[in-house]
Structure formats: structure tokens, C-alpha cells
């Protein structure tokens, strides 16, 4: 009898977890984390005029032509941030705090998406063959990232991206980067079929995110995609190798140096002429699709909250 009860409540919990998260955030099946996310859901939105701008309402959301962000969202990078951030990041509020870069983001994409809902000016049908991720819709968030400004390789056991993070990094257009895991019982290979035309989709809680290369930022090229929590930059599938000529951009792995297990290597890039460790989107056998970040941080991750 007791055992039955236990099984019943376990089933309920599993059902709850499945309802709560279409796919894992950063991600994990840690019930405690998921429950914390649930508790935070009702107080999640903190956008206001002095923070990240006015809260985006999907039914009236439009793109601001001058900021290339949703109208009402603040897009500002403070003058003390380095040029590679100031000149590339938007649709978020960036600043320097001690030895960290801080990004605050509503996390609403500046691209059309099925997941704005059909009544939104930002709505766009899914591509043929794609299937919606339930009734999930994009919702304004309050993501705050604190990222070390001087990233360093973590020696010894590296920190996994699989648990404890509501996002593992931020894209140059202010969006959450998720790792290579899907929701329990799902594989990312199957979730790919729910991606919108820009390779993104929202969780049940409305957090729009990219597991695979964000096509609004980098169409499988060598563009800067964003930065992970450990402070190391993320690039598309190709590496610019430190030259502005895009004709010689190449996918690392076919030459030298080959990407490590975390999809990174140290090489010169246009933005970092002296060389820096950086990640690329690359083949990931865990996920069964070929444009994902690896499972561990190269450096010591900062913090993120929502
Ligand atoms: Zn997902
Ligand atoms: Zn590279």
C-alpha cells in the first residue's frame, strides 16, 4: 500500500516535472532545482523602465528599427565594458561590477518566432515538418548573469553544465544559451523538431533559448555568438582564425588545433588577436545533432539567476 502511494506520488512528480519543463534549462532532472524554478515563476518578471525596459507583451511586440530589439526593451552596454562586448552585444543591459561583467536580460528574441503566439506581430509559422513544443510561448524573464571578466581555465575536475544553471551563457542578442541536454525522457535530437526558424524554442516557463546555433546571429558561420558563464566567448561552427577574410574561415577539427571535449580550443580570432580559448558549436554525439555546446565549462563559471 505504502509502496503504491510512493509510486503514485513519484508518477505525479514526474508528470509535474514534464509539464513544467518542456526541455531542461541548462539542464538537469534535479527535482529541487525544478521546484525552485517553479517557485520563481510567479515573481520572475522584473522588467521595468529602470531595469531592462518595459515588460514585453507578445500581442503588441514589435521590433525597434534603431535598436534591433523589441520595442521598450533597454539595450545598453556601459562604456567600461571591453570593445568586444560593447560592439557586439545588445538587447540586454551590460555593466562592469568588480571583476565581473553583469548582463541583465528580459530574454525576448529580436527575431520572429512561432512562440510569440499567432496574435503577435512577431509571429511566424514554423518551418514545414516542425511540430510545436506544446503550448509554450515566449515570456519576458529577468535573467541576471555575473561572468568573470578575466576567464581562466579550471584545473582538475571541470564544472558540468548539466545541473544548477538556468542558462549557461548569453548570446550577443541577449538570449539564453542552453547546453546539449533535453528534458527527461526526451532527446535533443527529437526536440530539434520543435525549433523555430532561428533554432530557438521556449521552455514551459517561457524562457526562449538556443541549444543549437542561433541562426539570427550566426548562420553556421564564424560570427561571435555570445559568452558562456565562465567568461569564454562562443563562436559559430567556423573559426575566423584571426583574419577578417571570411573566405578562409574553417571548422576546427579538420585542421589544428582540434576542438577539445568541451568544443573549445585556443586560437587567434579577429576580436582577440592575441589568442583566447573559445567555444564553437560542433558535432555532439550526446545530443545527436551537430551544432551544440559541450557538457562542461572550460573555466570556472560565474553565476546566473532568473
Ligand atoms: Zn530547449
Ligand atoms: Zn576557433
Image (spheres, grey):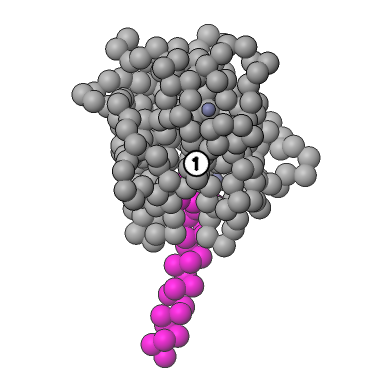
The quarter of the image holding the N terminus is: bottom left
Which residue ends up furthest to the right in the rendered image? 128
Taking depth in this image into account, of 56 and 14 the one nearest to the observer is 14
Please determine whether, in this image, residue 230 is positioned above or below residue 189.
above
Q: Is residue 5 found inside the magenta-colored segment of the image?
A: yes
Instruction: Kindly tell me whether residue 216 is visible in this rendering.
Output: no
Taking depth in this image into account, of 286 and 135 the one nearest to the observer is 286
Please determine whether, in this image, residue 267 is positioned above or below residue 208.
above
Instruction: Kindly tell me whether residue 33 is visible in this rendering.
Output: yes
The region drawn magenta spans 1-27
Which residue ends up furthest to the bottom in the rendered image? 1
Classify residue 197 by image quadrant. top right
Q: Residue at x 37, y 35 (%)?
A: 229
Which secondary structure class fits the magenta region best? helix
Instruction: Identify residue for label 1.
Output: 260
Q: Position of residue 280 (x, y in %)?
A: 54, 33
- Report whether the residue tagged 1 is closer than 8 Å to ligand 2: no
Q: Position of residue 282 (x, y in %)?
A: 59, 39
Q: Residue at x 36, y 30 (%)?
A: 231
Please determine whether, in this image, residue 25 is positioned above or below residue 177.
below
Q: Residue at x 52, y 60 (%)?
A: 184
Taking depth in this image into account, of 262 and 267 the one nearest to the observer is 267
Q: Position of residue 7 (x, y in %)?
A: 46, 79
Q: Secondary structure at mark 1?
A: loop
Please determine whether, in this image, residue 130 is positioned above or below residue 107.
below
Q: Label 1 crowding class (10 Å Cα cut-off): few <14, some 14-19, many 20+?
A: few
Q: Is residue 165 found inside the magenta-colored segment of the image?
A: no
Q: Position of residue 290 (x, y in %)?
A: 64, 42
Q: Residue at x 21, y 24 (%)?
A: 98
The quarter of the image holding the C terminus is: top left
Amino acid at each position: 500500500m505504502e509502496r503504491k502511494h510512493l509510486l503514485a506520488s513519484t508518477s505525479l512528480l514526474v508528470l509535474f516535472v514534464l509539464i513544467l519543463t518542456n526541455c531542461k534549462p541548462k539542464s538537469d532532472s534535479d527535482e529541487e532545482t525544478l521546484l525552485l524554478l517553479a517557485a520563481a515563476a510567479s515573481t520572475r518578471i522584473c522588467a521595468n523602465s529602470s531595469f531592462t525596459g518595459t515588460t514585453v507583451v507578445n500581442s503588441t511586440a514589435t521590433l525597434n528599427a534603431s535598436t534591433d530589439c523589441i520595442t521598450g526593451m533597454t539595450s545598453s552596454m556601459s562604456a567600461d565594458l571591453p570593445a568586444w562586448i560593447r560592439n557586439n552585444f545588445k538587447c540586454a543591459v551590460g555593466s562592469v561590477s568588480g571583476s565581473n561583467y553583469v548582463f541583465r536580460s528580459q530574454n525576448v528574441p529580436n527575431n520572429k518566432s512561432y512562440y510569440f503566439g499567432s496574435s503577435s506581430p512577431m509571429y511566424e509559422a514554423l518551418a514545414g515538418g516542425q511540430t510545436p513544443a506544446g503550448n509554450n510561448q515566449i515570456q519576458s524573464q529577468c535573467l541576471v548573469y555575473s561572468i568573470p571578466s578575466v576567464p581562466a581555465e579550471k584545473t582538475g575536475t571541470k564544472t558540468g553544465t548539466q545541473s544548477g544553471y538556468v542558462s549557461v551563457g548569453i548570446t550577443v542578442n541577449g538570449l539564453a544559451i542552453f547546453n546539449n541536454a533535453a528534458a527527461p525522457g526526451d532527446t535533443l535530437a527529437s526536440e530539434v523538431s520543435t525549433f523555430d526558424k532561428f533554432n530557438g524554442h521556449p521552455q514551459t516557463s517561457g524562457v526562449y533559448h538556443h541549444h543549437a546555433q542561433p541562426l539570427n546571429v550566426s548562420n553556421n558561420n564564424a560570427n561571435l555568438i555570445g559568452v558562456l558563464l565562465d567568461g569564454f566567448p562562443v563562436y559559430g561552427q567556423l573559426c575566423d582564425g584571426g583574419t577578417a577574410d571570411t573566405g578562409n574561415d574553417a571548422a576546427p577539427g579538420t585542421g589544428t588545433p582540434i576542438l577539445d571535449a568541451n568544443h573549445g580550443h585556443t586560437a587567434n580570432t579577429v576580436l582577440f588577436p592575441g589568442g583566447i580559448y573559445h567555444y564553437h558549436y560542433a558535432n555532439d554525439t550526446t545530443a545527436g545533432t551537430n551544432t551544440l555546446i559541450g557538457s562542461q565549462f572550460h573555466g570556472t563559471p560565474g553565476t546566473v539567476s532568473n
